[in-house]
Amino acid sequence: MQTETKNDMQIGIPRAMSYYNYFPFWYGFFEALGIKTVISDKTTKQTMSQGSALVVSETCLPIKVYVGHILNLLDKGVDKIFVPSIQSIDHKIYNCSKIRGLPDLIRNVVKRKFTIIDATLDKSAKNQGLYEFLKEAVAPFGITDEKKIKLASKEGWKVMNNFKIMLNSGMSFEKALSNAKKGQVVIANNQKSYPITVAVLAHSYNLYDDRVSMKIFDKLEKLDVKAYTSEQLSIEQLQEGISSIGSKLYWANEYEMTGGAGHYLQDNNIDGIITINAFGCGPDSIMIERISRAARKFNKPVLHLSIDEQTGEAGFITRIEAFTDMLFRKKRASIINKIDINENAQRYESGVRKESQHR
Ligand code: SF4
């Protein structure tokens, strides 16, 4: 077998789609095997427009963004790009067809010379579990030693688990990732109290890509609104959330949406829910409908934000401001009502007491 030179031992990873779920693992895994990970630059207007130009207009925004990131990696001179086909993440739990067919889509629309590393993860199929997936991912680098691959996988989990601990504690994605890559675990310690609390629910690639989500966390912070996501919930809470709104787990990214919604809709500390979904997303349209129905049942305000490459920031901000403003007014009214009810109750009680004393 031909020996790989130092430059060949690098893998391009698009900063899009599954990057936002699994990159900490891939980083730990590839680096442990001496494979340098090269990430595409942050999403810009150009990433979106270049990606959009290569696919049919009905394609959802995250896929257009993904294509843009592949082009960015090619412009950086990376010639091996990791485009996994993540079919099923657990028994009978599937990704949407676009995610499953990502390598084929990229092969068909990006007509430039490069190697697509298209490892397949399909936990619903026989012999296509994590080890087979990892084996496929490193075979183009001439790595076949089972022991080495398994040890590297452990390194991947170390980085991933540390990252998750920090994200769960409420730390930002970028900060948690940067700490995890350095092998550090720092717990976010935000003691500030907020008058309003919302849950922001979306697929990770819509939530943590600042360009796609238009920095929603920063905007909410400026409005004095505390934001939670599904990342702060345990797997048990997410599973309970899904069944509590009469849903059944089928889509791989259902935890992030209906799982979080089912939990937060019943959480009295959460004043409202904001969902972000890509225009034209099939799975999301089903999940959003379920969330809306459950929100009516639990009488909790919900704001649905739909995004595509035309979405303007001004309109996005206006809708968030109007929604949070309504939450402030609702909360103020409920506090005033409670005071009135308490005062009335006290007046009534003291009246009854006086009356009985006069009898
Ligand atoms: S789940 Fe929706 S947004 Fe995500 S890739 Fe599939 S169609 Fe696009």
Image (cartoon, grey):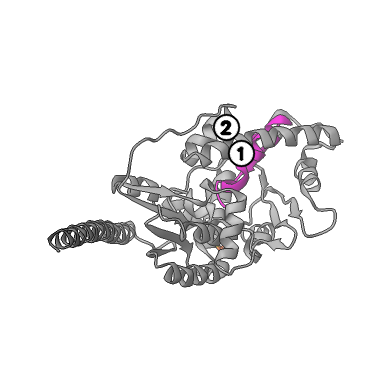
Is residue 14 part of the magenta span, yes or no? yes
The kind of secondary structure element at disc 2 is helix
Which amino acid lies under the numbered mark 2 shown in the image of this protein? Ala
Q: Are the residues flagged by discs 2 and 1 in contact, CB closer than 8 Å?
A: yes
Q: Nearer the viewer, residue 78 or 57?
A: 57
Q: Is residue 6 visible?
A: yes
Which amino acid lies under the numbered mark 1 shown in the image of this protein? Pro
Q: Which residues are magenta?
A: 10-38
Q: Where residue 81 sits in the image (x, y, percent)?
A: 66, 46
Q: Quadrant of residue 56?
A: bottom right
Q: Where residue 99 sits in the image (x, y, percent)?
A: 64, 60
Q: Where residue 304 sits in the image (x, y, percent)?
A: 41, 65
Tag 1 or tag 2, which sits nearer the N-term? 1
Q: Is residue 331 left or right of residue 229?
A: left
Q: Residues within 10 Å of mark 2 (few under 14, many from 20)?
A: many
Q: Where residue 118 sits in the image (x, y, percent)?
A: 72, 51
Residue at 52%, 40% (x, y): give it.
Answer: 167
**Residue that carries the numbered disc 2 in the rendered image:** 180
Location of residue 285 with respect to 16 vertically, above or below: below
Q: Quadrant of residue 29?
A: top right
User: Looking at the rendering, in which quadrant would you find the C terminus?
Assistant: bottom left
Q: Residue furthest front?
A: 359
**Residue that carries the numbered disc 1 in the rendered image:** 24
The kind of secondary structure element at disc 1 is helix
Is residue 157 part of the magenta span, yes or no? no
Mark 1 CB lies closer than 8 A to ligand 1: no
